[in-house]
Amino acid sequence: MIRDADYFKDFWNWFDLIGNTLFIFHFIEKTFFEVDQKDTKTNLMLIFGVGMVSLRSFSQLRQFKHFRVIIEMLKQTLLDMIYFLIMFMFLVFTFSVQWIVANSNRQEELK
């Protein structure tokens, strides 16, 4: 049984709380205030609210036996991609510095 203080210790409960709060703020702003359709703040609240609730729903698929393995595999793949992207960005940075150094001599020659 979850006590009141333990509710905020769970990571997914924060997703629920923030996502639903953003939905409520979006609804209140659209209902009671004159808001333009192109209002960026209101649209961002809706986008982040939908994103957070969707991520929470995605994690709830683990309750079904067939999805459990797929969700865990996807989670592990995304974690492994973080390390790959760090190495990839390091390589891109290294080659860009080499390119700048190599082209700096050409710029001096053209002057």
Image: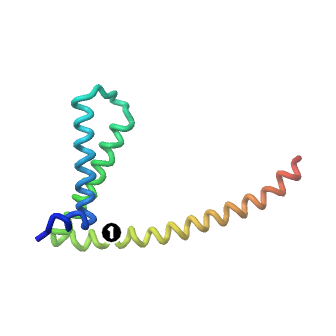
Among the 4 quarters of the image, the one containing residue 75: bottom left
Q: Residue at x 87, y 48 (%)?
A: 110
In the rendered view, does 90 fall on the left or right side of 20? right
Q: Residues within 10 Å of mark 1 (few under 14, many from 20)?
A: few
**In front of the other: 33 or 59:** 33
Q: Which element type, helix, strand or loop, lies under badge 1?
A: helix
Among the 4 quarters of the image, the one containing residue 88: bottom right
**Residue 22 x, y percent position in the rendering:** 27, 45
In the rendered view, does 33 fall on the left or right side of 63? right
Q: Is residue 109 above or below residue 30?
A: below
Q: Amino acid at mark 1?
A: Leu
Which residue does the numbered mark 1 point to in the structure image? 74
Q: Residue at x 24, y 67 (%)?
A: 10
Kindly give the residue lying farthest to the top in the view shown. 34
**Residue 54 x, y percent position in the rendering:** 26, 54
**Residue 74 x, y percent position in the rendering:** 32, 68
Kindly give the residue lying farthest to the front in the view shown. 5
Among the 4 quarters of the image, the one containing residue 46: top left
Q: Is residue 5 above or below residue 69?
A: above
Q: Residue at x 31, y 72 (%)?
A: 73
**Residue 109 x, y percent position in the rendering:** 88, 52
**In front of the other: 30 or 87:** 30
Position of the N terminus by quadrant:
bottom left
Q: Is residue 28 above or below residue 96?
A: above
**In front of the other: 56 or 17:** 17
Q: Residue at x 37, y 31 (%)?
A: 38
Number of disc labels: 1
In the rendered view, does 52 fall on the left or right side of 38? left
Give the color scheme: rainbow, by chain, secondary structure or one colour. Answer: rainbow
